[in-house]
Image (spheres, grey):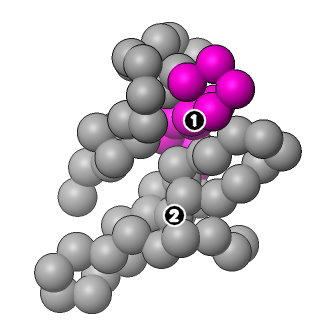
Amino acid sequence: MSGEELRDKNGNLLGRIVMEGRKQVLRDKNGNKLGEYNADDNVTRDRNGNRIGTGHLLMTLLRP
């Protein structure tokens, strides 16, 4: 899986942001979907489709 790797200060992989169609999807280190950001409507949603807020807020869904 390609995309932007997100790592902690020790270099441990925490997750990735990958493009799926026109959406940016945050996946944890195991590949589980944590949420998605749709630039067309400028909204971030969690893994269940619940609206988190306006703007790119994917990093708020990432937990170490």
Vertical order, 42 against 23 (above or below)? above
Compute the Cα span from label 1 to label 2. 11 Å
Q: Is residue 38 above or below residue 6?
A: above
Please give the name of the residue rendered at 63% of the width and 46% of the height, measured from the top-left corner. Answer: 24
Q: What amino acid is at disc 2?
A: Arg
Task: From the viewer's side, name the closer residue of 43 and 7.
Answer: 43
Q: Residue furthest top?
A: 50
Foreground residue among 57 and 9 = 57
**Looking at the image, which is closer to me, 31 or 17?**
17
Residue 30 x, y percent position in the rendering: 52, 63
Q: How many numbered circles does the render carry?
A: 2
Query: Residue 16 has which mark?
Result: 2
- The crowd level at tag 2 (other Cα within 10 Å; few <14, some 14-19, many 20+) is many
Q: Position of residue 1 (x, y in %)?
A: 71, 72
Q: Which residue is mark 1?
A: 36
Local secondary structure at mark 2 = strand
Report x, y in % for residue 49.
58, 17
Q: At which x and y percent is residue 53?
A: 39, 17
The residue at the point 71 percent across, 54 percent down is: 19
Q: Where does the C terminus fall, quadrant-wise?
A: bottom left
Question: Is disc 1 placed on a helix, strand or loop?
Answer: strand
* Type of amino acid at the residue the image marks with label 1: Glu
Residues drawn in magenta = 32-42
